[in-house]
Amino acid sequence: MREEPSRRVGSALGVLIALRTAVRAAVRGREALPPEPEPRPEVDPAERTVPANPRAETLVAVLLLLAALAGFGFIAVFIIFQTNTQLLGLTMGGMLALLAAAAIIAGKSVVPQETAVEERGPLLEEDETEELVEMIEQGGEGVSRRALLTGAGGLAGAALVGAAAAPIASLGPRLHGIHTTDWHRGVRLLDDQGRPYAVADIEIGSFYTALPEGGDPDHLGSGVLVVRLPAEYLHLPPARQGWAVDGIVAYSKICPHAGCAISLYRYPTYAATSAEPAFTCPCHYSTFAPGEGGRLIFGPAGRALPQLPLMADGSGNLRAAGPFHEDIGPSWWNVHRGES
Amino acid sequence: MRLVQHAVHRRLHRVMRWNEQRMGAAKGLKLALRYVFPDHWSFMLGEIALYAFIILIGTGIFLATFYQPGDAQVIYHGPYALLRGEQMSEAYRSVIDISFSVPAGLLFRQVHHWAADVFVAAIVLHLMRIFFTGAFRKPRDLNYYIGLLMLMLAILEGFAGYSLVDDLLSGMGLVIAYSVAMSIPFVGGQLAYLVWGGQFPGSSSFLPRLELVHILLIPLLLAVLITVHLIMIMRQHHSQFPGPGRRERNVVGTPTWPAYALRSLGLLFAVAGVLFLVGGLVQINPIWEWGPYHPYLSENGAQPDWYIGWLIGALRLMPNLEPAIGNHTIIPNPFWGGALFPLVVFGVLFSWPRVERRLTRDHLRHDLLDRPRDKPVRTAIGAAFFSWVLIIFAVGSTDRIFYRLNINYTGQIHFWRIAVWVIPILVFFITRAACRSLQRSEIHPLRAWQGTIVRRRPDGALEVVGESPDRVRPEPSEPARGTVPGAPGD
């Protein structure tokens, strides 16, 4: 027998409603029950005992005396050794631990032990609430242009908040100038002692950190990674064929993900089984291929590692052949991403 | 002996009269001394947080008298030989001096650092207790929100604190924070510029700003919120677990004076004692090993303080999703793990009381706590949620696992990208089933075996010869399995 389509829809709806009820029942379970009819008459848990425990009193006294000893010990250590952190910590911590033991034992075995019952009053008093509302409303008695006052007051309030918040803008400069670094055509690459890197200094398998000559070393764009790659690993994009000098390439050292300095360089030890050369950031492990224009191989970075074009001068030293062609450092919504 | 007692009594009487003539506070003080604290260990987690906060204020005042928030470069000439002659910022040098030259300086620095870790840990455990026992329900939902706000502030405060040092590790943390700020769509770049006073590492006013936030603004906010938190607890009285004689409208437990005051004082001393012992004996954040920070330097295998670990994990786990139109980035990647993830976590926590009220349609006031097993669905959702955060937290250590155990890093990340969604679902079903089965069996998992011992007689019949010492007979007055005694269908 074939069912009418409308019937089928009806039964499907029925199933849905049943499912919804079942899910609700499962979620709610027993929790929907009213919480509390007052229980049957029961035992009163209140009780009070006086320990009268001379042994515990002696113990507390001994602990307090030991704590005093440790405290004076701290003062002695402080005067004699001054910076002996271990002894200072032992004596001070020991004093506090002994005080803790004394207070806890006194609280449990010396003073009267009491289980008390305290009634918990209601929080909501309907009459009080109603009276409160009335009192507040009475404050507006006789006011006829309520809407006008509310509107004007709201506007004044907004102006107050805005005027109070506006000086926040003095905290920092407008966001511009972020695109520039100290790298320009002709700037020499120096090591952190200020010596220029020569083409011959750069060996295959190691990485070097370079800073711009005459630049601020603590500028986010200053640090640059320099490596030399053999031809088999060097596959720069066509537009960047001239950016390498003798197999030497340079990249911003600042990870374009979260701004950490990249300090891990993976170089194949046995080409047949090893992966290609890679830079890895130690913060979140974004991994970039230095032979491929800084392409991202793995990790969270959203763009490639910015590459710095290189050239060699007459005395064989490395120089920048131009500025970065994209923004260095972490991205923001208007970042210039570059082409690779 | 009696004479001494009499003298003490008269003296106390004089003091109280003096006080009364000026304040008239005897009624309030009597109430405070009779205030009842329910006896349960889990109620002390919040107290531990409070006491860690007190230690933080004390040690922090000491440290602040020596710290200099300057970024001017100076040469170190102090007693630590390995850094002598090294160029570093004034801020870093002042913390090196606290560690090596100020008497007891390193002790206070390490106690302060350990106390911060304990502070946040105690708050998180306290939050879990509140969540799983349903203590966030009316009338305590408001106080629960304040607690969550304090947790956010505590994490921020800890991060600001270890970022003040200006060592290599803190610089790396700050540049990640800067990147996360930059990544906020549309406003992020300008926001980061306002906070740092320019492009990272920021202007000279950045460290003084951070110090202001760390030693004044957030501590003040925390102190105010703690006060409100405690006043609200006093007004509503503590919640309590069900038990003999315990009803929705009463509180059963130990009054403040004298037993509870002494025990709580003992807890304060215990927290302080442990922190000073650990701070004296166990090294934490040896900043002289990391060296000064420069943006072009970094440390391999760096790990933040534990309460930042969940954010590092999220940043590491996130695939390289960075929506862009042409060459125009819309949302930079750090936004997902560094901003959206914590927003979602706190969003879930903040909205839970409302969500549960809607699901259960229970708008009543609750002063009796739930045992977690009695609310299988809530407990299962909570367990799944916290396991989700915990997995992401653990992913922050995948590089350590790679170094120590040589398990492929990329393989781990690929695995966790799937497992982070699968495991919480499993946790949900397992927890729910466990709660239901515990409800049925009425066995407390933390207590010993329970049952009766029977012996077979030679004639084949069985006789009871004893029962386990911990056997708990159901109390007639105790609401068993979350139901109400005497309710229909019970």
Image (cartoon, coloured by chain):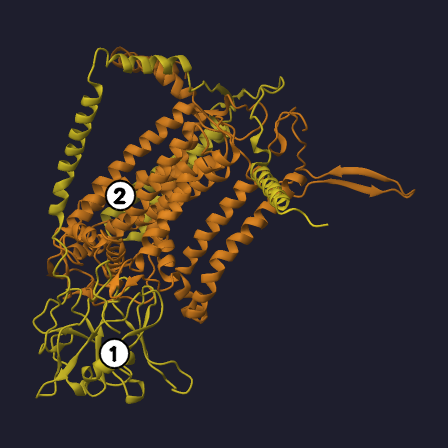
- Res B220 quadrant in image: top left
Q: Which mark is residue B59?
A: 2
Report the chain holding disc 2.
B
Q: Which mark is residue A207?
A: 1
Instruction: Judge by depth and name the residue closer to the eye, B176 or A55.
Output: B176
Horizontal and vertical percent for residue A79?
A: 23, 47
> Dividing the image into 4 quarters, which one contains the C terminus of chain B?
top right
- Res A128 quadrant in image: top left
Horizontal and vertical percent for residue A282?
A: 32, 67
Residue at horizontal 33%, vertical 57%? B304
Instruction: Judge by depth and name the residue closer to the eye, B134 or A3.
Output: A3
- Pointer 1 local density, CA inside 10 Å: few below 14, some 14–19, many at least 20: some
**Residue A95 appears anywhere in the view:** no
Give the number of callouts: 2
Furthest residue in direction right, as rendered: B459
Q: Which mark is residue B464?
A: none
> Dividing the image into 4 quarters, which one contains the N terminus of chain B?
top left
Disc 2, SS: helix
Horizontal and vertical percent for residue B239?
A: 47, 29
Instruction: Judge by depth and name the residue closer to the eye, B291 or A120.
Output: A120
Q: Is residue B464 above or below residue A313?
A: above
Report the chain holding disc 1.
A
